[in-house]
């Protein structure tokens, strides 16, 4: 089974556009094409340099290579859907699975960021709304200071979950504290991510995930990883990471196979198996460029 070159071009364009619009990692983190679809590993290019004493010779930078991992979503279409004069039915099937692929990619990237982030900044749980906002503000400024010590002085990128976004947008006397918090922490880009879960802490009574609105003051759950602050060396607009140079940032994505359609062939149920796919790996080149706010 095959599709015409024109039909494949239309579908691949839809996959790329949908992935661009759906993947937070694609919008927030610079990525680069290895130029070799068959490539299996890339350099880690670890770039954090410890301060030297006097005129001591600095050790070489670098690290172990990283494996490029395939991620895909398989699905079936009928022959009529695949070869219909108008590609609408095929595009509908492809777009829905591309959104699912973007979620898989985001989950992988968030896991790497959370595991690699250094020196978490702790937020206490005081009583009183004003005190809570002030503690959050202090924590974000402390996180900003950690990033600036490592040379990341451009406006940062903040990743948070739904509960974190609610806390940032708390209204006092009808006014939001959102923009003052971002200004103080030098943040120009905020993304809400479903994949930023709080699964390290104990599960509260009743089996509720601690990420689903548990009060940290109750002691029933922990809010680890609710906020992740990404340092920037370049001034990157919200959603503009695709145009940024990947080698300068603390994290980037190495891609050997971009988001695209794969046609596997006919199945024993007289349908056609397809997949939307990507092969990539997140490269955390400087773990001091990502701060956990706990």
Image (cartoon, rainbow, N blue to C red):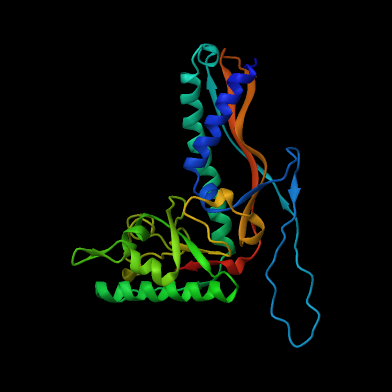
Residue at 52% across, 53% down: 28
Q: Give the residue drawn at x 46%, y 20%.
A: 88
Question: From the viewer's perspective, is 224 left or right of 55?
Answer: left
Q: Residue furthest right?
A: 57
Q: Residue at coordinates 75% horizontally, 64% vertically from top-left?
A: 62
Position of 216 relative to 280 (above/below):
below
In this rendering, the answer to whether 275 lies above or below 99 is above
Residue 16, given in percent of the width and then of the height, sits at: 55, 35
Image quarter of the N terminus: top right
Give the position of the C terminus as an image quadrant. Answer: bottom left
Task: State left or right for residue 88 relative to residue 79.
Answer: left
Q: Would you place residue 114 above or below residue 26 in this image?
A: below
Rendered location of residue 252, percent (x, y) = 62, 54
Locate residue 150: give its quadrant: bottom right
Vertical placement of 78 versus 178: above or below?
above
Q: From the viewer's side, name the closer residue of 222 and 117.
A: 117
Counting from the top left corner in percent of width and height, residue 254 is at: 67, 49
**Residue situated furthest left in the rendering:** 173
**Looking at the picture, how far across and down is residue 4, in whole percent?**
63, 16
Q: How many marks?
A: 0
Q: Relative to the observer, which residue lies in front, 230 or 226? A: 230
Q: Residue at x 43, y 50 (%)?
A: 194
Residue 114 in the figure: left or right of residue 264: left
């Amino acid at each position: 089974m095959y599709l015409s070159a024109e039909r494949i071009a239309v579908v691949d364009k839809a996959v790329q556009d949908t992935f661009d619009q759906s993947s937070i990692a694609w919008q927030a983190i610079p990525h680069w094409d290895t130029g070799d679809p068959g490539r299996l590993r890339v350099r880690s290019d670890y770039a954090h340099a410890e301060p030297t004493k006097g005129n001591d010779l600095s050790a070489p930078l670098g690290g172990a290579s990283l494996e490029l991992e395939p991620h895909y979503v398989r699905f079936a279409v009928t022959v009529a859907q695949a070869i219909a004069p108008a590609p609408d039915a095929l595009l509908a099937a492809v777009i829905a699975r591309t959104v699912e692929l973007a979620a898989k990619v985001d989950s992988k990237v968030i896991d790497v960021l959370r595991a690699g982030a250094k020196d978490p900044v702790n937020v206490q749980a005081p009583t009183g709304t004003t005190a809570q906002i002030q503690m959050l503000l202090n924590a974000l400024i402390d996180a900003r200071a950690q990033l600036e010590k490592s040379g990341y002085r451009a406006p940062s990128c903040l990743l948070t979950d739904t509960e974190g976004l609610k806390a940032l947008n708390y209204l006092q006397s009808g006014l939001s504290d959102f923009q003052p918090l971002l200004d103080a922490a030098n943040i120009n880009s905020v993304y809400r991510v479903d994949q930023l879960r709080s699964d390290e802490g104990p599960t509260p009574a009743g089996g509720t995930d601690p990420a689903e609105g548990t009060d940290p003051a109750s002691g029933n759950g922990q809010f680890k990883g609710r906020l992740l602050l990404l340092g920037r060396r370049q001034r990157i607009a919200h959603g503009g990471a695709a145009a940024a140079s990947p080698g300068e940032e603390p994290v980037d994505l190495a891609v050997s196979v971009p988001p695209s359609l794969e046609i596997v062939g006919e199945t024993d149920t007289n349908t056609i198996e397809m997949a939307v796919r990507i092969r990539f790996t997140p490269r955390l080149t400087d773990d001091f460029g990502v701060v956990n706010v706990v």
